Image: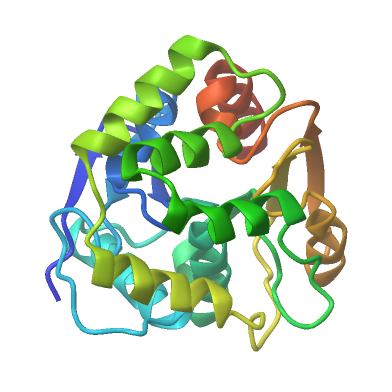
Amino acid sequence: MKIAWESTGDGPPVLLIQGLGYGRWGWEPVVSGLAPRHRVLCFDNRGIGESDKPEGPYTAAQMAGDALQVLDEAGIERAHVVGASLGGMIAQELAVAAPARIDKLVLCCTTSGGPDAVPMPDVTKRLFAEAPSLAPEVALRRFVENALGTDPPEALVDDLFARRLANPPDPAGWQAQAAAGLGFQGVDGEITAPTLILAGTADNVVDHRNVEQLARSIPGARVELLQGLGHLFFWERPDEVVTLIEDFLG
């Protein structure tokens, strides 16, 4: 499997795992904040960007194997891991499958999965139902706005919209990744890595109340709620998010 990855900075390694439909470019504001003190690795998940796009559906466990491959190719025995949304599910699978490879774990805007998980908010369900009747660029901009918090700056919406236009996901790859998220029923084992859980209280994609169940499933997990921020909170207030991560990683 070809997985496209890149390394920035020097210091204790941090592996960043993106979510559905976003390539490694989706970590840009976090990379610039962490790189002065860390070696930051980010990569394109299978199904998107410059990585291979095998026939789906995928599973979060398969995609965790890809993340482990990146650590192997980078020559890194042990790293901090940060995962967002679907990337948070992948990070959980990685933490159970290869606990010796993870130092600390940061889970962003994600869920523990399973029948007790809080469902996707209705506003996003309605948007998915309406999207096929909209012009593609109109639908895309609506999805960008929906992924941000209360009253997002227009300049940020414009920036993310332009980046999404410039980096369109492969349709089959997107569907295969989506299957990994929809099929995630939680990990089969205990997560032992020290864990920080971050969520925006205005997240329209993954209900922030999922952090309660997620925290219960991970002994000693610490939760930080970001008031008024959405699913892409690390784009809305990257400096604050980097500070929280840095403080936790030590």
Residue 40's spot in the image, x, y percent? 34, 39
Tally the marks. Answer: 0
Q: Quadrant of the C terminus?
A: top right
Question: Seen in the image, is 61 located left or right of residue 92?
Answer: left
Q: Compared with residue 79, is residue 39 higher up or lower down, i.e. above or below?
A: above
Q: Quadrant of residue 30?
A: top left
Q: Residue at x 60, y 31 (%)?
A: 148
Q: Residue at x 61, y 41 (%)?
A: 231
Q: Pick whichever, 71 or 125, lies toward us.
A: 125
Looking at this rendering, what residue extends furthest in the bottom direction? 188
Q: Pick whichever, 92 or 22, lies toward us.
A: 22
Q: Compared with residue 199, is residue 19 higher up or lower down, i.e. above or below?
A: below
Residue 4's spot in the image, x, y percent? 16, 56
Q: Compared with residue 239, is residue 105 higher up or lower down, i.e. above or below?
A: below
Q: Is residue 166 visible?
A: yes
Looking at this rendering, what residue extends furthest in the front direction? 133
Q: Is residue 98 visible?
A: no
Q: Pick whichever, 9 or 18, lies toward us.
A: 18
Residue 12's spot in the image, x, y percent? 40, 40
What coloring was used for the rendering?
A: rainbow
Q: Compared with residue 129, is residue 223 higher up or lower down, i.e. above or below?
A: above
